[in-house]
Image: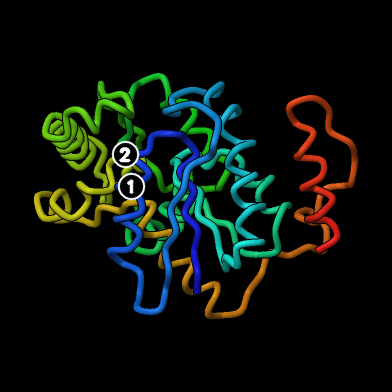
């Protein structure tokens, strides 16, 4: 099978690291292709960034159908563009935030998300609530690190992540830790050894879930909510999305 991981930001170094994380758990016979959009923000740390990242992310899903992809993973913890992407293809589309929450709910009664800068706490809390996991997520904790800081100072980022994860265990009684940024993927195994509880990277969770869905032969339901978008003209810079939508609707 062929799984396309889409890093919604345009950081090529992060895209490379995300691809490596996905391949590290993919089973033999699974091809992992990891890309980022041709346009959009270099990192995602606000509602504005998420909205700006969504069009390029959805476009990569549309391209993937022509490339023979069997499933898609959106590798930003806020899952920008996820619902629109599901309308644009019949293949399964997973967000790493959603994938980590479902996986954590099986492994632990209570868990915490540890993420990047404080301003995105509300964004993550709203996402958790939207997926119906507020009763299990006991806290969303943040670090002082911006997304691109993780690449520049991995040792410092790991320490900040470790400190907040320990506080989540001691103060919030968290029984698992969810890494709230795809840039944290490389830290998951070491952090789990340090803490002695499950530490979940959303990229890894999404790859395993995507493999299972493809092997089960399941596709995105087109009965009602996720049916293809209605064909219509798009103006200006978005003109090509109207044409892509027409193709998706005809599939």
The image shows residue 50 at horizontal and vertical percentages of 54, 30
**How far apart are labels 2 and 1 at the CA level?**
5 Å
Say which residue appears at 27% left-offset and 42% top-offset: 184
The image shows residue 10 at horizontal and vertical percentages of 45, 34
The image shows residue 51 at horizontal and vertical percentages of 60, 28
Total label count? 2
Callout 2–callout 1 Cβ contact below 8 Å: yes
Q: Secondary structure at mark 2?
A: helix
Q: Secondary structure at mark 1?
A: helix
Residue 100 in the image: above or below residue 29 = above
Label 1: which residue? 16
Residue 19 in the image: above or below residue 215 = above
**In-front residue for pair 66/81:** 66
Say which residue appears at 73% left-offset and 65% top-offset: 221
Residue 13 has which mark?
Answer: 2
The image shows residue 205 at horizontal and vertical percentages of 39, 59
The colour scheme is rainbow
Say which residue appears at 31% left-offset and 44% top-offset: 179
**230 left or right, relative to 36:** right
**Label 1 neighbour load within 10 Å: few <14, some 14-19, many 20+:** some
Q: Quadrant of residue 163?
A: top left
**In-front residue for pair 71/97:** 71
Residue 68 in the image: above or below residue 4 = below
Q: Quadrant of residue 181?
A: top left
Residue 157 in the image: above or below residue 16 = above
**In-front residue for pair 149/171:** 149
Say which residue appears at 42% left-offset and 63% top-offset: 32
Which quadrant would the C terminus be assigned to in this image?
bottom right
Residue 108 has which mark?
Answer: none
**Label 2 neighbour load within 10 Å: few <14, some 14-19, many 20+:** few
**77 left or right, relative to 161:** right
């Amino acid at each position: 099978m062929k799984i396309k991981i889409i890093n919604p930001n345009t950081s090529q170094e992060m895209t490379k690291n995300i691809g490596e994380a996905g391949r590290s758990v993919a089973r033999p016979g699974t091809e992992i292709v990891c890309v980022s959009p041709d346009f959009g923000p270099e990192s995602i740390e606000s509602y504005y960034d998420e909205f700006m990242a969504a069009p390029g992310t959805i476009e990569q899903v549309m391209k993937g159908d022509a490339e023979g992809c069997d499933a898609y993973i959106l590798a930003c913890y806020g899952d920008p563009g996820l619902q629109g992407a599901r309308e644009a293809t019949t293949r399964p589309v997973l967000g790493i935030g959603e994938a980590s929450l479902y996986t954590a709910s099986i492994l632990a009664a209570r868990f915490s998300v540890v993420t990047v800068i404080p301003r995105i706490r509300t964004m993550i809390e709203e996402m958790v609530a939207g997926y119906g996991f507020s009763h299990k997520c006991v806290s969303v904790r943040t670090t002082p690190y911006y997304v691109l800081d993780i690449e520049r100072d991995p040792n410092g980022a790991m320490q900040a992540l470790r400190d907040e994860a320990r506080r989540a265990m001691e103060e919030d009684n968290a029984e698992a830790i969810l890494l709230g940024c795809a840039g944290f993927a490389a830290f998951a195994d070491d952090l789990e050894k340090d803490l002695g509880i499950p530490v979940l990277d959303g990229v890894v969770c999404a790859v395993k879930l995507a493999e299972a869905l493809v092997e089960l032969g399941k596709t995105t339901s087109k009965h009602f909510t996720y049916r293809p978008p209605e064909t219509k003209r798009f103006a200006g810079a978005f003109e090509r999305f109207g044409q892509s939508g027409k193709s998706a609707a005809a599939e």
